[in-house]
Amino acid sequence: MKYLKSSLTAAGLLLAGALSAQTAFHVKAGEVKGEVQPTMWGLFFEDINFGADGGIYAELIKNRSFEFYQPLMGWKIQRKEFNEGEILVQNRGNENPANPRYITVTAKDAKDKSLGMTNEGFRGMGIKKGNRYDFSVMYRQQEPGVKLRLELINAKGEKIGEGELIPNQSGADWKKQSISFVSNAEEPKAKFNIWFEGTGKIDLDMISLFPEDTWKKRPGGMRADMIQLLADMKPGFLRFPGGCIVEGRDLATRYQWKKTIGPIEERQMIVNRWNTEFVHRLTPDYFQTFGLGFFEYFQLAEDIGAEPLPILNCGMACQFNTAEVVPLNELDEYVQDALDLIEFANGDVNTKWGKVRSDMGHPKPFNMKMIGVGNENWGPQYIERLKIFTKALKDKYPEIKIVSSSGTDPNGDRFDYLNTELRRMNTDIIDEHYYRAPEWFLQNAARYDSYDRKGPKIFAGEYAAQSDRIASPNNKNNWKTAIAEAAFLTGLERNADVVVMASYAPLFAHADGWQWTPDLIWVNNLNAYGTPNYYVQKLFSTNKGTHVVPLLLNNDAVTGQNGYYASAVIDKKAGELVIKVVNTSDKAQNADFLIDGVKKLASSGKLIELHGENLEEVNSFENAVAVSPKQREIKVKGRKITAALKPSSLNVIRVKMM
C-alpha cells in the first residue's frame, strides 16, 4: 500500500517502473471466510437526470395533466385566428386537490388545423418506425361535436403517424377513451399535435401517449431497453425511490409514498427537487408525476429478481437546502407511513393496505425484508428520530431490517458521530456513501478489513469515482474511474461478511436532461448504453458467488501490491471458483493462482476481461461497447491457474472445482 500510494498522480492511476514478470497468488478455496449475501450487488434508483419522467417511465407527453407550475409548460397552442377563451386552464382545487387542473376547449367550426395544441415531449419524443403508439385521454363533453385529430411529427414538421379520436360518451362524469396508431418513420425529436375539429365544448385531462413496446408489454409501463440493462445485471436489490428526493428541499416537497399509488389520475404530482438544484443545469420542467410510484417500484424489483429496499423520509428535509425538521411530537404521521408501507408490501389482502396492493393487481405480498429510515441525514436530530422509528418498527415487525444513514461522507466528525451512535443502537445496517476521487477508492480497498465482525452490517449505498470533483458537470465515466471502483469492490467482496449490499449512484442520465455526473447508464430518446462503470458493476454482480475465500499475496490480502487488487469467492451452486483480479499498473503482468483446498480443477476455465486502451476512454452512443467485457478460455494445470493480465484491466476467472 505504501508503494501504491506514493505512485498515484493526478495524471492517472497507473504505476511507474518495472514490475515482477510473474506473481504467485494463493487461494484457499477450502477456507470459507463468510457468506456472500444474495443482496450483495444491487441498484440505486433516483429520479434525477430525467430518470423517471422522461426516462424509464415511458410516457411521451410532458405535463399531461397541466399540473406544472406553469400549467401549459410543454404545450404550445396552435391557432390560425385568435379567439379569446378557446382553450382555458381550469382549476378545481377544492373538488380534486390531487389533480386540480384540466383544460376546456371550445371549438367553433374548427377545421384545417385552425385550432390545436402541440406537446414537445421530454426533449422531444423518441419514435420508432413500425411501432404502435397508444393515445388516451380523460374527457367530459359539455357540448358534443369536437373530434381530436392526432399527429406525430418529426423535427422537420412532417407527419410520421396519425390517428383520430371521436369522443363517444357524454354526461357530467369523466370518461377515458383510447386509440392506437403506427409510426411510419424513426425520429428522436418528434412532437405530438392534437387538432380540434368541429363545433362543441370539451374538457380534457390526463392526455397520454405510450409506446406499445414497454417492459413486458405493460400498458402505461416502463421503457424496455433501460430496464433490460438493469435485468442483465442480475441485481440483488433495488433501492428506491432515491436519495435526496426522499427528503425534498423542504418537507412540503418530500416524497410521500401514499400519494404515488392507486389510479394514475389520483396521484398528486410534485416538483422534482433537482428542478433548480444546480445553476449549471437548471431544469424548470422537471416534475414527478408518479406514474412510476411505489407499486411500480415493487413490481419492477420483482420483475428483475431484486429485493425491494424502499427509503422513507424520517421527518427531516434536505439539510443542505432548508434543514427543516418536523417536531418530535408530530412525528407519528411519518412513523405510521413506514408501518403502513410494510403492510402494503407484505400484508394479507384482508388488511387495509394489503387490500390496496391487491386491488392494484398484486394479491400476493411483495415479501419486503428491509426498509430505510432517512437518506444522508445527520446529527443528533437524526438519531433521536431514528430511535422513535426503530422502536415502532421493531415492536410490530421485528423481522424487518432497518437501514440507517451515516451521513454524506465516509469520514470526518459527522461520520464519526453517526457511526458511534448507530453502533450503540446496534442498528441492523449502516448506509455509507462515497463520492470521491479515483485515488480514494484505491487507497480504501482495505477499508472494511478491520471492521467489527459482530457489529452492524454495511450497505455501500452510494458510490462513484469523480473524475473532476463532486457534483462537477465535467465528471466523466471514463476507464480511470471504473478501474478504481473495480479495485475498491474487491475490498467489499473480500469483506462480504460485513458488507451485505452495494450500489453505484446515480443510475441513469438523459443526454439532454441531466443534472449530475457521473452516471452508470446514459440514454437519449431512442438509445441507452452502459458506461465502463456499468460493466464493472455487472461483472461483480453476475459473478457473485456464495462464499468468500482467502486470496493472498505473501500471506496478505491483495490491496495494491504491484498494482494488484483481488478477491475470490466460490459458487457452491455452480461448483466453481471465481477470482476477480484488477491490474491497475501500466504493464502487462503474468500471474499464477495456486489453489489449495480442492481435490481437482477442470483442465480449463474462462477469463472475462474488461480493459481500457487508456484511462480516458469512455463509451458513447456512437460506440457503446468501446470498454466492454471480452471472454476467452484459460488453461489450468493441476491446481494452478496462469493468466496473462493486460495493463489497466479487470479480470474475472471462473473454473470448475471437481
Image (cartoon, rainbow, N blue to C red):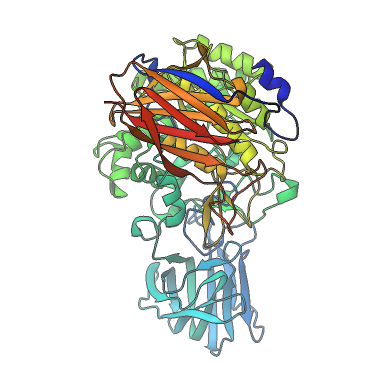
Closest to the observer: 597 or 203? Answer: 597
Quarter of the figure with residue 139: bottom left
Q: Up-down: is 563 above or below 282?
A: above
Q: Is residue 597 left or right of residue 525?
A: left
Q: Position of residue 430 (x, y in %)?
A: 51, 21
Q: Quadrant of the N terminus?
A: top right
Q: Quadrant of the C terminus?
A: top left
Quadrant of residue 595 in the image?
top left
Residue at (40%, 81%) from the top-left corner?
A: 166
- Lateral position of residue 435 relative to residue 362, left or right: right
Foreground residue, 431 or 632? 632
Q: Residue at x 25, y 41 (%)?
A: 364
When the figure is inspected, residue 202 is found, relative to residue 640, above or below; the finding is: below
| Count of numbered tags | 0
Location of residue 37 in the rendering, given as x and y in whole percent from the top left corner: 38, 25
Measuring from the top left, give residue 204's x and y in whole percent.
48, 70
Instruction: From this view, report whether residue 552 is shown above or below residue 100.
Output: above
Residue 581 seen in render: yes
Q: Is residue 247 visible?
A: no
Residue 134 point in image, percent of width and height: 41, 69
Q: Nearer the viewer, residue 111 or 61?
A: 61
Between 636 and 130, which is closer to the camera in this rendering?
636
The residue positioned 33% from the left and 15% from the top of the image is: 597
